[in-house]
Image (cartoon, rainbow, N blue to C red):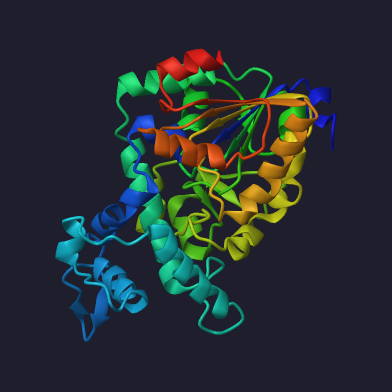
Amino acid sequence: MKGLLKYYGINKVFILGAGFSRPAGLPLTSELLREIHDVSGVKPWHIGNGKMAKWGQADWLVDELKHYYPTSRISHKRILENKVKIDVEEFLSYVAASSAFIENTSEKFDEHGSHFQSFAKCWLAEVIYNYQELIKPENQLLYDRFAKNLNNSLVLTFNWDTILESTLKKLRIPFSYDFNSAMESKQLPFIKMHGSIDWFRPRDYNYQKLGTKKFEKISELINDMYRYNGNIRDCFSNYMTPFIVTPNFDKLNQLRTFGDLWSTPWIYLQDELEIIIIGFSMREDDFHTRAFIYPQLYHGAKNNHINIKVIDFASDQKQQNSIKRKFKGIRNIEFSFDGFNEETLNWLV
């Protein structure tokens, strides 16, 4: 609805992707296979007859990889040596496709899909949490400064981590995951399009064991979902699966669990705005996000309603050209290819 953001005094929209969290030391998608192997490898896995798998749940991970890539040389040793060159997004796409096949069968594990997909989300979330807990003070300063310059802004993030909201809480900057609630209470609207590592739907003994008071309702916009206000590792240890959208080429089944969050996402880009895109890849095969972002950018810039700044990292001209192609035909756009850092933040503020 054009004019909605202007009515509430919002003149700037930030779109955040993995590159925004890179200065905190979080791994990129290309680095995730080794990381989830490490996390799953220390978790017990029963293989029957009272026996435990030597490599824990990492044995299960390797079995699944071998299933989908039967001609590849896959082993624990090769994964640890970074010799297994498999696209994690592609692998998780196979896993998600298999989950979709069992949607209405007795083989479905929970609302996350198959047994394996549910565990894979736990592994991914724990990897992210482990890294963000190690953020260096000097790197945290970058996020502190960024957060202090979010007046009259709206944030759309596709990241699962909680770096920015932790920063906002530390600085006592009020925010809400629900746009309407944020506007009513004059808070920063902070929309997490792909969920969060601390979002859960408490179930049975898990909910009681961890303490009901530690679960906070996120929003009326998002179906029956709660944020865990405590050490998230407690949730992972109790086999609670976080609501995150895993990187794959078909996200539809996962997005359905987020209620109205994805009902009208284009309204956040329909106004006279400065739009700042940080570390968001705008993959050409990510149809769900491009379906509402690219057309709005193109038509808004064409009509001179919006100006766009893109911050990404490119080490050479070839990478720069690749990034620019994802924004083909869009006017009023500027690029910075040095990644998210103090210098590029100066460019924004």
Direction from residue 198 to residue 183 in the image, left or right: right
Residue 105, horizontal then vertical, whole percent: 57, 84
Q: Is 7 situated above or below 279? A: above
Taking the spot 54% from the left edge, 45% from the top edge, the residue there is 227
* Labels in figure, total: 0
> Which quarter of the rendered picture does the C terminus lie within?
top right
Residue 81, horizontal then vertical, whole percent: 16, 56
Which picture quadrant has residue 80?
Answer: bottom left
* Camera-nearest residue between 213 and 132: 132
Would residue 64 be visible to someone looking at this image?
A: yes
Would residue 229 be visible to someone looking at this image?
A: no
Residue 303, horizontal then vertical, whole percent: 80, 29
> Which quarter of the rendered picture does the N terminus lie within?
top right
* Camera-nearest residue between 344 and 253: 344
Q: Is 219 situated above or below 275? A: below
Taking the spot 53% from the left edge, 55% from the top edge, the residue there is 245
* Camera-nearest residue between 244 and 267: 267
